[in-house]
Image (cartoon, rainbow, N blue to C red):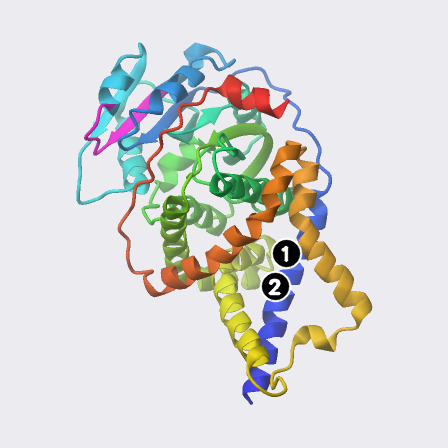
């Protein structure tokens, strides 16, 4: 009986993996975004900042150099419960607004954004779009041109391409960069090409202001980006991925900092899964909407990874115990002519994504340590599952002062 249960679980999760593998083929090709609309839309650029005095200045200077007409955007820095010199740094830039928020009981980016939007709606000037960045970001100078174009074409929620500004700092930051390249190319792009919904990534996000006013932010979990994405999908609003609108994010350098960050993500992911998985799945089945069914499968990813860990532990434990293995592996039931190509493509997906993204050749050497990073997701996910009720937001410290010119020069 136990063997049968394990085999059924293997088949179920193998099918989920096969589905994602199938989607990845649609990320091999992409059509470059074409800008067909002149600057027209006005934007409020919101920067979420908690004790970011070291890096926020570089982002502000970057945004002030955007190609988009200066009169069509304003910069608001949400100085959220700051105890350092963030406010002073922001105020040193003319025409940039330092919006101070103090509420130690409601901490986290989701609460900060919700507060800022309420403040924004009170202002005399109204905006067509709202863009959200993190204080450690750098932004391509044509970012708003792409957002303007998408809004003019009718998009309501847009996610830019998330890249890494410090991939060479350590094996950990490099692993995060590889993960970003993979997700952009073989997770986000296929969904865009197939007309499915894309998913927000926490920064580099643009929203139609009228939509935000209508539905409110309402995303205050540890993964406010995923929560807002799901709320949009439930309403039939599907976020769009803009591959050419680039944002560069700072990734942790140490394993400890990365593990803390990923633990917070997974705790939030399990929380969102618990709240939204079944309603979205049922809505997708009832409406016969593959977009919503795909969204439900995406929401389920945390449990997919968790199940993979436990199934792996059980099967490898069975293999190393004395005597013949007692459990049947699903791979043992497949013909070798199917198993070998399948496993080969699974292993080649990451270097393939890097090749398609024309990543600097030195980064391929980081593939040696990348499996360690992937394996570390398992204990992080298990810990997150058993602590998912912990909604305490943890701050990731950012210290890398890098200019956009430095990042782009290394990509040439």
227 horizontally vs 404: left or right = left
Residue at the spot x=26%, y=50% of the render?
Answer: 392
- The region drawn magenta spans 75-85
Residue 407 against residue 385 in the figure, above or below: above
Q: Which mark is drawn over residue 113?
A: none
Residue at the spot x=32%, y=16% of the render?
Answer: 96
State yes or no: discs 2 and 1 in contact (Cβ < 8 Å).
Answer: yes
Disc 2 on helix, strand or loop?
Answer: helix
Inspect the magenta stretch and tell me whether residue 108 lies in it: no
Disc 1 on helix, strand or loop?
Answer: helix
In x, y percent, where is residue 400? 40, 28
The reply to whether residue 193 is visible in this rendering is no
Viewer-proximal residue among 327 and 37 = 327
Q: Which residue is mark 2?
A: 16
Inspect the magenta stretch and tell me whether residue 81 lies in it: yes
Q: What is the residue that sits farthest to the front in this orientation? A: 322
Q: Quadrant of the N terminus?
A: bottom right
In x, y percent, where is residue 40? 51, 17
Viewer-proximal residue among 15 and 290 = 15
Q: Which residue is mark 1?
A: 20
18 horizontally vs 260: left or right = right
Residue at the spot x=31%, y=31% of the render?
Answer: 49
In x, y percent, where is residue 20? 63, 56
Callout 2: 10 Å neighbours few (<14), some, many (20+)?
A: some
Q: What is the residue that sits farthest to the right in this orientation? A: 337
Distance, label 2 to label 1, CA atoms, is 7 Å
Residue 127 against residue 303 in the figure, above or below: above
Q: What is the residue that sits farthest to the bottom in this orientation? A: 1
In x, y percent, where is residue 99? 25, 25
9 horizontally vs 303: left or right = right
The reply to whether residue 277 is visible in this rendering is yes
Choose top left, top right, bottom left or bottom right for residue 72: top left
């Amino acid at each position: 009986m136990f063997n049968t249960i394990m085999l059924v679980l293997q088949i179920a999760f193998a099918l989920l993996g096969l589905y994602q593998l199938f989607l990845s083929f649609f990320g091999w090709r992409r059509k470059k975004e074409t800008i067909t609309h002149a600057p027209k839309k006005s934007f409020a650029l919101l920067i979420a900042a908690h004790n970011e005095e070291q890096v926020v200045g570089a982002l502000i200077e970057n945004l002030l150099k955007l190609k988009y007409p200066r009169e069509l955007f304003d910069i608001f820095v949400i100085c959220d419960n700051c105890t350092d010199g963030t406010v002073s740094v922001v105020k040193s830039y003319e025409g940039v607004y330092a919006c101070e928020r103090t509420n130690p009981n409601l901490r986290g980016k989701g609460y900060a954004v919700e507060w800022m939007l309420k403040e924004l709606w009170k202002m005399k000037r109204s905006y067509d779009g709202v863009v959200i960045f993190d204080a450690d970001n750098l932004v391509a100078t044509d970012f708003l041109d792409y957002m303007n174009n998408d809004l003019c074409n009718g998009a309501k929620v847009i996610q830019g391409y998330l890249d890494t500004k410090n991939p060479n700092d350590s094996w950990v930051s490099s692993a995060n960069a590889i993960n970003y390249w993979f997700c952009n190319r073989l997770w986000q792009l296929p969904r865009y090409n197939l007309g499915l919904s894309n998913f927000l990534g926490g920064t580099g996000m643009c929203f139609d202001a009228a939509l935000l006013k209508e539905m409110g932010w309402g995303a205050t979990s540890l993964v406010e980006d995923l929560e807002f994405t799901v709320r949009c999908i439930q309403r039939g609003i599907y976020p769009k991925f803009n591959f050419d609108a680039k944002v560069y994010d700072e990734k942790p350098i140490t394993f400890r900092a990365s593990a803390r960050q990923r633990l917070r993500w997974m705790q939030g992911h399990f929380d969102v899964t618990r709240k939204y998985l079944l309603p979205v799945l049922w809505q997708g089945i009832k409406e016969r909407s593959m977009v919503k069914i795909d969204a439900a499968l995406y929401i389920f990813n945390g449990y997919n990874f968790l199940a993979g860990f436990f199934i792996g532990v059980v099967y490898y434990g069975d293999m190393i115990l004395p005597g013949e293995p007692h459990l049947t592996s699903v791979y043992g039931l497949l013909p070798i002519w199917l198993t070998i190509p399948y496993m080969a493509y699974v292993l080649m997906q990451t270097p393939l994504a890097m090749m398609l993204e024309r990543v600097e050749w030195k980064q391929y050497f980081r593939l040696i340590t990348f499996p360690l990073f992937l394996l570390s997701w398992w204990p992080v996910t298990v810990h997150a599952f058993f602590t998912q009720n912990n909604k305490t937001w943890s701050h990731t410290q950012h210290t890398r002062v890098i200019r956009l010119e430095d990042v782009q020069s290394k990509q040439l």
